[in-house]
Amino acid sequence: MLELRSITKHYGVRLLADQLSLQVAEGEIVALLGPSGSGKSTLLKIAAGLEEAESGSVWFDAQDITQLPPERRGFALMFQDFALFPHLDVRDNVAFGLVEQRVKKAEARLRAEAMLARFGLASHARHRVWTLSGGEQQRVALARALITAPRALLLDEPFSALDAALRQGLQAEFRQRIFEAGMAAVLVTHDEAEARAMATRGLRLVDGRLQRLW
């Protein structure tokens, strides 16, 4: 279980988190909604270790990980711009996290090819990512996130750059694959329809506090 405990965070004089607490169980997708600037992405970054809270702590499976650097938390992040590496082909983009974990490149590539096959992208393994459609690039980004078997998946507006029809198809696919992987997941979005399509629980961040939507 991923937990934020009594998080407080300001941005200038604006209060983004006011003694805020959140629990996300394995296999659960929690959506965080709220207007731009409300602090949704900041909460993700605090969970990931990319930003520090002024007070409070981050826990995973009853262990305090507040002081752990991002690379030791075992979480995967996905952003709206996909953050794929243009100088690598699709296979090596997916294999990247494994190589960073010191898996031998040959084995990492084999595992990447197997993951791409699960996503229906086997024929694109040697293509450059910039030759793929937006939906294909997003599938590559998810494959890259899942291949390292992360303990939690943090999604920051992952579909906002895609058209409406493509978003709807990917929402169902992402939801299914996250459930299959059995990980805790947090989805930041401003789109309530998207949140309801994907999340098991929805919360709105208002004035530093979370309000239950469903």
Image (cartoon, rainbow, N blue to C red):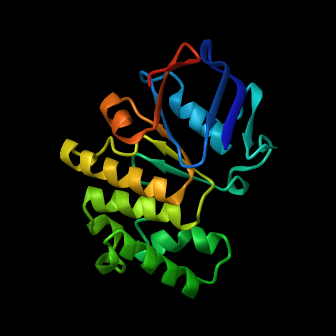
Q: Is residue 3 left or right of residue 43?
A: right
The answer, for residue 5, to whether it is visible in the render is yes
Residue in front for this viewpoint, 171 or 47:
171
Q: The N terminus is located in which quarter? A: top right
Residue at point 55%, 80% (across, down): 108
Residue 89 seen in the current view: no
Residue nearer the viewer, 74 or 61: 61
Observer-nearest of 141 and 64: 64
As drawn, the residue found furthest toward the left would be 165
- Which residue appears at 48% of the width and 64% of the height? 144
User: Measuring 78% from the left and 48% from the top, which residue is drawn there?
Assistant: 68
Q: Quadrant of residue 164?
A: top left
Q: Describe residue 121's horizontal placement relative to residue 75 as left or right.
A: left
Residue 145 spot, x, y in % from top left: 51, 60
56 relative position to 202: left or right: right
Q: Is residue 16 above or below residue 144?
A: above
Is residue 97 found left or right of 88 in the rendered image? right
Residue lying farthest bottom?
106
Q: Position of residue 122 (x, y in %)?
A: 34, 78
Q: Is residue 180 above or below residue 19?
A: below
Expressed as whole percent of the image width and height from the top left, the position of residue 48 reads 64, 44
How many marks the image carries: the answer is 0
Residue 40 on image: x %, y %: 52, 29
Image quarter (top left, top right, bottom left or bottom right) of the C terminus: top left
From what the image shows, is residue 69 above or below residue 150?
A: above
